[in-house]
Amino acid sequence: MKIAVLYKSNTGNTKKYATMISKELMCKAYDITLTDKKALYQYDTIIYGGPVIIYKIKKLRQAKRLCKGKKMIIFACGGNPGIEEEIRKIKNTNIPNNEYPFFYLPGGLNFAKQKGIFKFGLTLVKKWIEKKQERKEKYDKFLKSFYEPISYIKEENIIDLISFVNTL
């Protein structure tokens, strides 16, 4: 079985995981923005990873088109350190029929690396949270990320995905 990792990364977190996975599986990693269908032709299985923005995995639709007829495994990389309710929502939003194996890999938050409308939106959310009288503890890390980057990236986070691939 020939495997490749395909990814989209906004701030570098998803790329870090794609690189870790490709090294562990001894396969190539491709940036979806620099890749066409011809480059993926030789592979049976594609592991696609993308950043999560408002519960959506970025470029997932494009990845599905590029990988039509191949086995796909999907991982999402986001700023959530592992809140199950949020992860379930990400999975249900992107893979509602469970048609692909899904893994969530916590990335981190770095406000300085955000761009455009998303950065503007985060600023609005930050202001809204700061104005709340009863601020929940779960928002503290989010607010801290505006001043200090937070990273949850660890080699151990890919163990389940690697184990799954090794059973194929």
Image (cartoon, helix red, strand yellow):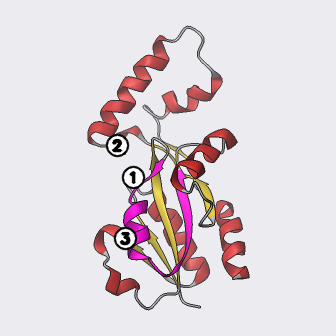
Q: Residue at (37%, 70%) from the top-left corner?
A: 31
Q: Nearer the viewer, residue 90 or 76?
A: 90
Looking at the picture, which amino acid does disc 3 mark?
A: Asp
Mark 3 falls on what kind of element? strand
Mark 2 falls on what kind of element? loop
Q: Is residue 60 magenta?
A: yes
- Res 31 label: 3
Callout 3 touching callout 1 (CB < 8 Å): no
Looking at the picture, which amino acid does disc 2 mark?
A: Gln
The residue under label 1 is 11
Q: Give x and y (percent) for residue 85.
A: 66, 39
The image shows residue 59, relative to residue 84, as above or below, that is: below
Callout 2 touching callout 1 (CB < 8 Å): yes
Q: Give x and y (percent) for residue 2.
A: 54, 89
Looking at the picture, which amino acid does disc 1 mark?
A: Thr
- Res 114 label: 2
Does label 3 or label 1 sit earlier along the sequence?
Answer: 1
Q: Residue at (41%, 19%) from the top-left corner?
A: 127
